[in-house]
Amino acid sequence: QVQLVESGGGLVQAGGSLRLSCAASGRIFSRYAMGWFRQAPGKERELVASISWSAGRTYYADSVKGRFTISQDNAKNTVYLQMNTLKPEDTAVYYCAAGPSLVERYDTWGQGTQVTVSS
């Protein structure tokens, strides 16, 4: 069974940067992809970025393209989300997830980490 633990959230001013980490344990290589989702108050959870473990394929939501970068360290079973040029609208709880597809059907979730961007 896969377990995911996020870290790296916090409070940052607009224009600043944060790096989120997601440490995975268990049979992670049985999962195809790792993704970062976010959910702001009153809004639906949305996929921000994802990466496939083996092929290194990536996906980015239009709202974060050019600002966020997802990467993986296979030796550490860790996925990162580097977030640059943060905006107040990036404020949300960010969740790490694992699943069999790059953009859908995620079925294993971390507990979430809060990211707050002040204007």
Image (tube, rainbow, N blue to C red):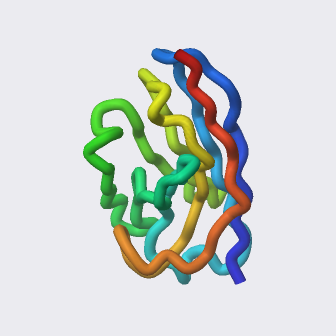
**36 vs 64: above or below:** below
**40 vs 96: above or below:** above
In the rendered image, residue 64, in percent from the top left (x then y), is placed at 35, 39
In the rendered image, residue 119, in percent from the top left (x then y), is placed at 52, 15
How many numbered marks does the figure carry? 0
* Residue at the limit of the structure toward the front, as seen here: 42
State left or right for residue 66 relative to residue 50: left
Closer to the camera in the image, 24 or 108: 108
Q: In which quarter of the view is residue 24 placed?
A: bottom right
State left or right for residue 4 relative to residue 52: right
* Residue at the limit of the structure toward the left, as seen here: 62
- Identify which residue is drawn at 62% across, 31% down: 116
In the rendered image, residue 34, in percent from the top left (x then y), is placed at 50, 64
- Identify which residue is drawn at 53% across, 52% down: 42
In the rendered image, residue 96, in percent from the top left (x then y), is placed at 59, 59
Closer to the camera in the image, 107 or 69: 107
- Identify which residue is drawn at 47% across, 47% down: 71
- Identify which residue is drawn at 45% across, 33% down: 89
The quarter of the picture where the N terminus appears is bottom right
Closer to the camera in the image, 50 or 55: 50
State left or right for residue 79 relative to residue 65: right
